[in-house]
Image (spheres, rainbow, N blue to C red):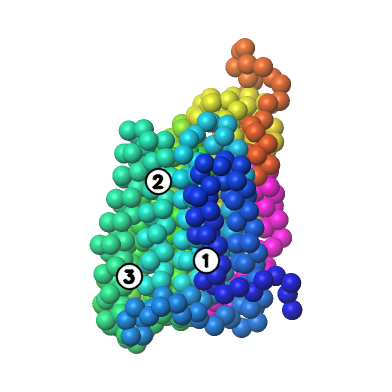
């Protein structure tokens, strides 16, 4: 028996949308608006936590909302993989909210009611994706997520922001409408269902030659997973305020992309059927190339947010590779990396934003001696970097270990080598900012006194950094939960 509320899945999904309405209605009352921003992440988090016990006890019965066609409707359920995604989003929303309030206040941004309402809608859309029981429901919330985050990317209203926003929304909508949607229709025609079921729905219902083409449509249609050449939206979105970058890169958008890839592999194709498809190797090696190429680009980015953006492109491909290896170990490793990378990458973006607020320095080459002025921020950056690299004592070591084990188990020596090389490249682009900050002297004339960013920024980044350390010890629980849904 649990003291946590065991809400129906759709009720949990509704909470952020209700929060968005409340925030919008309080636009002329800043204190009330901020109170709503603080308030709604709490019941959302508790509602997601309340799903753990039912899942461990055997599952949550599907919740049918509305029937669109005979046998096809908007339906919600809680699968173990979706629960992990929802836990990540709900936990990080608790910490992203105070950070966003502190950052947006410090930088003097306007239109905050619109900003935080869209922020809340994005988290609701992420929950809708996590708890979708079929591809139609997943697709609906996938598109809501794209549309709701466009105003966040273009929030500043500058020409650069509008251009970045257009690139962002165009690539996400073109891939989903022109590739993912036809793939869904084809799946419905071939199987008569769009349900997400363990073991997949395509095996025995579609010839592997047709399934090979369907795989290409689905993988490249999931533009949020940022496979090359459809990755440009992600660096373009860096024109957004840093809290948006953290939301896009760690919590909602990119994690929705890789979650969809894992969901397709496990619940639509099924790992056994996936191994039969001729194009699996093609997409696998495209993802492997993306993993390495994006890391090489990150090495040459002086702007810190751009460096982290290309790092995200690379890290997302770890998860896509894990799905396409189609082994038990690699699929679980992909799910674990979704969780571990979320905590590590949001820490890095939080730190980048705190550095900018305190010093207005945005480039790696400007970080000399910053560790003396911002010791907590730069220590958190180091911990986040270690997590993304995949080293102990952070949770990142376990997800990367499972991915490498999955590649080894399937005999993909080239992929094993790519994981090792990518890890070395991670070290090459994530540790130099820390070394500059702590090992080089401050530029002449800059005061050496400690001057961190606003507390609303510093406390969340310290907590997410601690979270990466806690996950080192909770990896077994994450593995156990994922194992329930990945066979």
Q: Dividing the picture into quarters, in which one does residue 217 lie?
A: bottom left
Disc 3/disc 2 C-alpha distance (Å): 31 Å
Task: Between residue 185 and residue 487, name the one nearer to us.
Answer: 185
Q: Is residue 170 above or below residue 358?
A: below
Task: Between residue 130 and residue 4, name the one nearer to us.
Answer: 4
Q: Is residue 48 visible?
A: yes
Where in the figure is residue 33, as x and y percent of width and height? 57, 46
The residue beneath circle 3 is: 215
- Extreme residue toward the bottom, this view: 204
Q: Earlier in the sequence, mark 1 or mark 3?
A: 1
The residue beneath circle 2 is: 151
Q: Dividing the picture into quarters, in which one does residue 284 lie?
A: bottom left
> Is 97 inside the magenta-drawn segment?
no
Which stretch is magenta?
A: 461-487
* Residue beneath the point at 28% across and 83% down: 190
The residue beneath circle 1 is: 13
**Image position of 277 (left or right of 433):** left
Disc 2/disc 1 C-alpha distance (Å): 21 Å
Q: Nearer the viewer, mark 3 or mark 2?
A: 2
């Amino acid at each position: 028996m649990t003291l946590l509320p065991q809400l129906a899945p759709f009720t949990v999904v509704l909470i952020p949308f209700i929060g968005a309405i409340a925030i919008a209605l309080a636009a002329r009352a800043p204190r009330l608006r901020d109170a709503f921003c603080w308030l709604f992440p709490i019941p959302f988090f508790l509602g997601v936590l309340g799903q753990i016990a039912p899942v461990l006890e055997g599952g949550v019965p599907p919740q049918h909302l509305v029937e669109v066609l005979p046998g096809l409707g908007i339906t919600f359920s809680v699968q173990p993989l979706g629960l992990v995604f929802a836990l990540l989003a709900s936990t990080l929303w608790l910490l992203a909210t105070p950070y966003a309030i502190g950052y947006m206040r410090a930088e003097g941004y306007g239109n905050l009611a619109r900003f935080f309402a869209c922020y809340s809608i994005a988290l609701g859309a992420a929950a809708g994706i996590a708890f979708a029981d079929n591809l139609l429901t997943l697709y609906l919330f996938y598109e809501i997520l794209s549309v709701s985050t466009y105003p966040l990317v273009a929030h500043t209203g500058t020409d650069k922001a509008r251009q970045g926003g257009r690139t962002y929304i165009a690539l996400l909508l073109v891939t989903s409408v022109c590739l993912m949607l036809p793939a869904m229709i084809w799946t419905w025609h071939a199987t008569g269902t769009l349900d997400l079921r363990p073991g997949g729905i395509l095996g025995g219902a579609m010839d592997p030659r047709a399934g090979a083409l369907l795989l290409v449509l689905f993988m490249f249609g999931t533009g949020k997973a940022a496979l090359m050449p459809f990755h440009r939206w992600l660096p373009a979105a860096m024109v957004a305020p840093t809290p948006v970058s953290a939301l896009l890169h760690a919590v909602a958008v990119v994690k929705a992309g890789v979650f969809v890839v894992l969901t397709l592999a496990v619940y639509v194709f099924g790992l056994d059927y996936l191994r039969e498809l001729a194009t699996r190797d093609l997409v696998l090696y495209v993802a492997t190339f993306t993993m390495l190429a994006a890391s090489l680009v990150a090495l040459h980015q002086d702007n810190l947010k751009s460096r982290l953006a290309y790092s995200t492109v690379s890290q997302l491909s770890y998860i896509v590779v894990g799905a396409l290896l189609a082994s038990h170990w690699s699929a679980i490793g992909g799910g674990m990396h979704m969780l571990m990378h979320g905590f590590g990458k949001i820490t890095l973006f939080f730190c980048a934003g705190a550095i900018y607020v305190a010093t207005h320095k945005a480039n790696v080459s400007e970080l000399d001696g910053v560790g003396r002025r911002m010791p907590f921020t730069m220590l958190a950056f180091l911990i986040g970097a270690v997590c993304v690299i995949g080293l102990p004592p952070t949770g990142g070591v376990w997800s990367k270990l499972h991915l490498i084990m999955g590649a080894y188990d399937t005999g993909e020596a080239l992929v094993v080598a790519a994981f090792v090389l990518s890890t070395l490249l991670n070290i090459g682009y994530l540790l130099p900012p820390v070394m500059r900050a702590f090992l080089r002297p401050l530029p002449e004339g800059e005061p050496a006194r400690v001057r961190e960013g606003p507390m609303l920024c510093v406390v969340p980044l310290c907590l997410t950094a601690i979270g990466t350390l806690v996950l080192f010890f909770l990896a077994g629980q994450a593995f156990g939960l994922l194992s329930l849904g990945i066979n």
